[in-house]
Image (cartoon, rainbow, N blue to C red):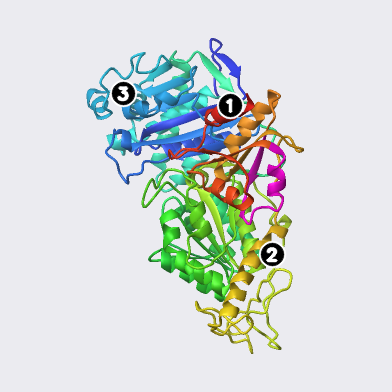
């Protein structure tokens, strides 16, 4: 669509913008946000997103508990987070406004669907005063747009559609307004709509018409005095796509299986927010992926363990409560010493907790949540795109050391997305597996002297019949053994095997003062982006603040203590009550400062600043 320039409207160039779409869970905010994200990425901007879903399956429409949100930051430089606070808030009803207005930046813009602000919806949102008064809006700039009525007007000739179906298109009218405001092309969305509604062309035509009408309205309504342009980001050359963390995890596992020359098997039970990994891998039967939606969490991991015994690259996925259910079978994976990748997309807890909100509270469960001495390596992804690489790394370690591996992501990473540079699979490390086929002198628990991994034998290999089970094994034959000295040897050997992985993982890197300084901010997992942004700002101000971020948590990188000793203060930031901090203090007997948050939300840069500024005084 060719846009007609209005000479009376000024265009301003910006480095980055944060937009939050908010409305009822039936208003299509996730779809709208994803379309804007895809368009921004397609236009060459770097992007990071944060979807925010209601916890209830279907909260009452128009209520605070039913508000669904989607935040995206896009810019002309590397973007590390979806942003702390929105520069623009799209509020489709009073509840969405009330739930989000406090977060809008001081000079931010609020766009509301004026048609939804009626007496009934205002009462549902429990406003006691006019929601559009300067006081309720905290004196921020607001655009009152008749979005619903303009959508209905645009679709007056579409007789096949009911009024309710027409109203569902209002999110595309809103999208059109944003596309005009930020000088976006509609090609990406137009292609998506035509593909989505290929069997219902009248719906494709309706949505595209409403999208264009939104752009025309924004240009001619007189409500907007400015437009904005965000230039392309100087990203490394390559082919990019917008990818969620869950999609990236699935593709990372698939890539690991491909590079290992094995069939991938995923045995899982659907659970928020991990289900999309199962859905992603179910689409890739053409690559030999086999997925099983099991009847429960225990069945999911047990089928995966059976596949590992059969010689497949085996995986299982879950979230916090499901990880607890899998604990006994995880112990079985430890004692049978079979390769298995266990992905835990963390969420708020305990129990069912906050299934759609983010948290990092499963670290100690991953570390210790099994009976007996059951050491399992632990990795954590730091961004949606990094989920691909950490899933691949988890597969590498599992296959090389014949061990289960836990990969921790979280809802923030799993549901969030960013621009992902598609790698050449042939450039990824070779994970080719060599199965034992020679029956001469075969002993099931004889180990590689370097890795302490036992050999992997496919069932049915001539002359190599063997059995595995949950009872303690003889150190060589694998037969059941109750000998106390043998048990002592096996427990220590399994621990030594995992401890030895420290020699096969990257050292902990310092971003900032390589030789040491005042403050080191340590994090793991999804806290990476917020910490990196804040450290960058401190360093531009000439302040001695640095960052170290863990992706390999158990075992810790071998230079961890050496890095910590270089700094006067070590701050450990995490979205829990200090679980990594406990592990670091108990492992290295060092003094650290714990910075924690448990609100179902990521850190903001201001929350990091409060602690660090005090240390810099």
Residue drawn at the location 46% of the way across and 30% of the way down? 20
Dot 3 or dot 2, earlier in sequence: 3
Q: Label 3 to label 2, Cα distance in Å?
A: 58 Å
- Outermost residue, top side: 8
Q: Is residue 158 above or below residue 105?
A: below
Considering the numbered disc 2 on the image, is that residue within a helix, a strand or a loop?
loop
Report if residue 420 lies within the magenta region. no
**Front disc: 3 or 2:** 2
Residue 171's x, y, as percent? 40, 32
Image mark for residue 614: 1
Q: Dot 2: few (<14), some (14–19), or many (≥20) neighbours within 10 Å?
A: many
Considering the numbered disc 3 on the image, is that residue within a helix, a strand or a loop?
helix
Residue 336's x, y, as percent? 56, 74
Q: Dot 1: few (<14), some (14–19), or many (≥20) neighbours within 10 Å?
A: few
Q: Is residue 80 visible?
A: no
- Outermost residue, right side: 515
Residue assigned mark 3: 115
Q: What range is drawn magenta here? A: 546-567
Q: Is residue 281 above or below residue 477?
A: above
Image mark for residue 431: 2
- Contact (Cβ within 8 Å) of mark 1 with mark 2: no
Front in this rendered view, residue 144 or 439 = 439
Q: Label 1 to label 2, Cα distance in Å?
A: 47 Å
- Contact (Cβ within 8 Å) of mark 3 with mark 2: no
């Amino acid at each position: 669509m060719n846009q007609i320039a209005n000479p009376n409207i000024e265009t301003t160039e910006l480095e980055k913008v944060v937009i939050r779409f908010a409305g009822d869970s039936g208003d299509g905010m996730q779809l709208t946000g994803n379309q804007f994200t895809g368009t921004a990425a397609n236009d060459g901007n770097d992007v990071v997103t944060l979807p925010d879903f209601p916890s209830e399956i279907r909260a009452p429409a128009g209520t605070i508990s039913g508000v669904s949100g989607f935040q995206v930051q896009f810019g002309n430089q590397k973007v590390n987070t979806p942003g702390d606070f929105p520069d623009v808030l799209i509020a489709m009803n009073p509840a969405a406004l009330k739930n989000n207005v406090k977060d809008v930046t001081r000079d931010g813009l609020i766009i509301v669907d004026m048609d939804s602000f009626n007496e009934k919806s205002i009462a549902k949102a429990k406003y006691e005063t006019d929601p559009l008064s300067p006081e309720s809006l905290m004196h921020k700039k607001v655009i009152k747009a008749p979005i619903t009525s303009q959508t209905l007007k645009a679709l007056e000739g579409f007789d096949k559609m009911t009024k309710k179906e027409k109203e569902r298109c209002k999110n595309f009218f809103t999208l059109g307004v944003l596309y005009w405001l930020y000088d976006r092309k509609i090609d990406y969305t137009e292609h998506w709509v035509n593909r989505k509604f290929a069997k219902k062309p009248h719906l494709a035509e309706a949505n595209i018409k409403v999208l264009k009408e939104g752009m025309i309205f924004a240009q001619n309504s007189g409500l907007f005095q400015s437009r904005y342009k965000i230039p392309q980001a100087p990203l490394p050359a390559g082919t990019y796509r917008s990818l969620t963390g869950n999609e990236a995890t699935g593709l990372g596992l698939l890539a690991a299986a491909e590079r290992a020359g094995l069939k991938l098997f995923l045995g899982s039970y659907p659970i928020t927010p991990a289900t999309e990994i199962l859905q992603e891998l179910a689409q890739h039967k053409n690559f030999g992926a086999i997925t099983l939606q099991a009847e429960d969490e225990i069945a999911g991991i047990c089928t995966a363990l059976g596949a590992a015994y059969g010689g497949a690259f085996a995986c299982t996925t879950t979230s916090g409560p499901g990880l607890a259910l899998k604990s006994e079978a995880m112990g079985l994976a430890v004692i049978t010493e079979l390769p298995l990748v266990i992905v835990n997309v963390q969420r708020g807890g305990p129990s069912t907790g906050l299934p759609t909100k983010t948290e990092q509270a499963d670290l100690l469960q991953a570390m210790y949540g099994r009976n007996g001495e059951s050491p399992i390596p632990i990795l954590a992804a730091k961004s949606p795109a990094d989920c691909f690489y950490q899933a691949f790394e988890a597969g590498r370690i599992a296959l090389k050391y014949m061990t289960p591996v836990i990969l921790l992501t979280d809802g923030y990473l799993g549901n969030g997305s960013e621009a992902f540079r598609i790698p050449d699979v042939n450039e990824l490390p070779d994970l080719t597996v060599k199965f034992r086929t020679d029956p001469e002198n075969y002993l099931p628990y004889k180990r590689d002297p370097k890795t302490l991994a036992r050999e992997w034998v496919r069932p049915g290999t001539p002359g190599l019949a063997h059995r595995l089970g949950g009872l303690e094994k003889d150190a060589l034959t694998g037969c059941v053994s109750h000998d106390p000295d043998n048990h002592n040897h096996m427990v220590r050997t399994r621990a030594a095997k995992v401890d030895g992985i420290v020699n096969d993982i990257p050292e902990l890197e310092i971003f900032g003062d390589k030789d040491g300084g005042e403050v080191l901010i340590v994090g793991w997992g999804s806290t990476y982006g917020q910490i990196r942004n804040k450290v960058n700002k401190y360093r531009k101000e000439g302040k001695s603040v640095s960052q170290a971020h863990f992706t390999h948590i158990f075992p810790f990188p071998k230079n961890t203590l050496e890095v910590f000793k270089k700094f006067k203060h070590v701050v450990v930031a995490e979205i829990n009550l200090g679980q990594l901090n406990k592990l670091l203090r108990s492992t290295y007997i060092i003094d650290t400062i714990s910075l924690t948050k448990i609100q179902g939300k990521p850190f903001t840069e201001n929350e990091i600043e409060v602690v660090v500024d005090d240390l810099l005084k």
